[in-house]
Image (cartoon, coloured by chain):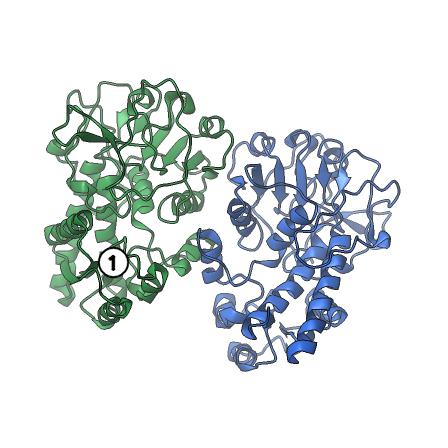
Chain colours: A green, B blue
Amino acid sequence: MASMVFTDCCSTTTPRLLPFRRNPLFHRNHGAVFLRPLINPSSPRRLSLHSSSASASPSPSPTASLATEESAKVIDGKAVAKQIRDEINAEVSKMKDAIGIVPGLAVILVGDRKDSATYVRNKKKACESVGINSFEVRLPEGSPEQEVLNSIAGFNDDPSVHGILVQLPLPCHMNEQNILNAVSIEKDVDGFHPLNIGRLAMRGRDPLFVPCTPKGCIELLHRYGIPIKGKRAVVIGRSNIVGMPAALLLQREDATISIVHSRTKNPEEITRQADIIISAVGQPNMVRGSWIKPGAVIIDVGINPVEDEKSPRGYRLVGDVCYEEASQIASAITPVPGGVGPMTIAMLLSNTLVSAKRIHSFQ
Amino acid sequence: MASMVFTDCCSTTTPRLLPFRRNPLFHRNHGAVFLRPLINPSSPRRLSLHSSSASASPSPSPTASLATEESAKVIDGKAVAKQIRDEINAEVSKMKDAIGIVPGLAVILVGDRKDSATYVRNKKKACESVGINSFEVRLPEGSPEQEVLNSIAGFNDDPSVHGILVQLPLPCHMNEQNILNAVSIEKDVDGFHPLNIGRLAMRGRDPLFVPCTPKGCIELLHRYGIPIKGKRAVVIGRSNIVGMPAALLLQREDATISIVHSRTKNPEEITRQADIIISAVGQPNMVRGSWIKPGAVIIDVGINPVEDEKSPRGYRLVGDVCYEEASQIASAITPVPGGVGPMTIAMLLSNTLVSAKRIHSFQ
């Protein structure tokens, strides 16, 4: 469990931009979709959805709506994710009917971490909800690395498996890079393979998979009809799993990108130039109102626990962006939770479907 | 031959930022080192060299010095490249004496393009000058793609070859991507393989090779002791061969990067924020004085031919940056020619040496 950080937007000091923390509530937190939104669901001011998908785009479920009384419109990740899951469900059925193939996602879990077990359970549930088969291998904490590699090799060769995830973090005695490199690039639905990242960076090349969280960020912009081309975009954080690929994706869509990180001397000044801000830094409420250009669109990837005596759990989750201040200035903003979190697992399901379609040449 | 562009800095209109052109005088122009400097070599104001290399760093040859009467100091790529070639020469001799191995670079040339033939000849000369063996295959314009692939396969398997270059452009009937992908990643001294680019983009990973021109840009900054960490860096152009990898390299060194390109609405405003500008866009004199923050450092990758009746060739070469204006404002600047050009081929030789050392585990 990450250490608690006691931070709120009323603080007059500007938090320092620290190196990205691998917060277990954020890192590969495909389970965030199941967290209960904490934001007051009154006075809905959601943006209308403009789907970029060719498939049917039902309106978001009213029960999933999130709202605030502030001026910014809420980008409702929970509703979009629900819509995407419905689309995936329809595609999975169509594929099964047409060629008798059901997409399959395999997850390998090593050790007894409770948070990891929860995420794996949530992934399994999400697969079930859209008709994707899920496979699971659980290995004890002390397993030799070779045993994990053997499981990966088995799934690589298994034609009923189209996506493979190794739940992180792995026990300390294992070499994470060795293990992740063993996953066949055709089944690397996380999209973290360097070959995928290279293709993402290069013009004229296409990655096999786009990493789930950044893909979810861009999908939110698309679904809400927010233009990217020619816009100034600032990505805060340069992690391999979110910040860096998010910047590459924005550039692929012809945004002019700047990447702010722990060594940036004037993050506030640079961020204030952005039409689109994607923050993925793991610092609660770091992006204050003064960092935001009026009318900017904010995608807040951070999911940070802060102490909250009023909460039964003793803490609540907040983003990297001070929501109360930002929602007065931005034109649209993702809430935390209920913004990017639900999109990550939807994109994992999407990548698994993409993989199955590609492997079986199904359009 | 690229079409001539008639542009000088006296024009009052700001040139448009157009998509990057594959200028044959620039693209993979490892031969630029041999171009005669056009800048008046009086009143030397070169920055002193601070080598980042552990090896001996002789001062640049006085005969190679470039200078201007303006305020910016000249970053003398020709002198640095000479210094690097001397270092490589020493390393090659050391390796030969110690383990009897001589690094080898193979070049494949298809067709009769004069410019390509010149570049290949220049590469061969450069190899000879540092004691690297060079190998060459020349195939007629109409050769089948398979013949090129066969040559690559031969060099992939040849233990005396440590680097393979396919001279571009290839004839139209050939699939460039197929051919480049056939080069073994261990011998891809151009560093353009997506796996290399992916590793370059990712924190905690290292590419086998860094693409030559961007590597040359960063090496110039290092050798002149210009700090990168924490600086604002703007890269103009997002090509796979220069702009994009240059931005990734700057970010690896903790610069805060912004990438300006043909879809950027306010390139001048963004560029004016930079402490370091790398321009690789192929537009003669596009970056005017008003784009430059006083004291900025400018690395000009562009090598653009412009009409010049006074020149015996009828044209002269200029950079992307209006040198006359920029040299009044910047603190340091690379000339064109004699700046980045000579560095590209030096970095190709460096990558070939790196490859031979790695393959033979020689430190």
Residue occupied by mark 1: A165
Q: Which amino acid does label 1 sit on?
A: Leu
Left or right: where does residue B181 sit relative to residue B325? left
- Identify which residue, A284 or B107, lies in the foreground: A284
Percent coordinates x, y for residue B221 in the rendering: 66, 46
Q: In which quarter of the image is residue B100?
A: bottom right
Q: Quadrant of the N terminus of chain B?
A: bottom right
- Identify which residue, B43 or B53, lies in the foreground: B53
- Identify which residue, A313 or B187, lies in the foreground: A313
A16 versus B280 height, above or below: above
Q: In which quarter of the image is residue A271?
A: top left
Q: Alpha-carbon neighbours of circle 1 within 10 Å: few (<14), some, or many (≥20)?
A: many
Q: Residue at x 55, y 70 (%)?
A: B358
Percent coordinates x, y for residue A75 in the rendering: 26, 32
Q: Which residue is drawn at 50% across and 29% down?
A: A266
Residue B194 can be seen, yes or no: yes
Q: Residue at x 58, y 42 (%)?
A: B236
Q: Residue at x 75, y 72 (%)?
A: B128
- Identify which residue, B202 or A130, lies in the foreground: B202
Percent coordinates x, y for residue B226 in the rendering: 66, 42
Q: Quadrant of the C terminus of chain B?
A: bottom right
A230 versus B304 height, above or below: above
Looking at the image, the residue that sits furthest to the right is B42
Left or right: where does residue A254 sit relative to residue A285? right
Left or right: where does residue A202 sit relative to residue B214? left
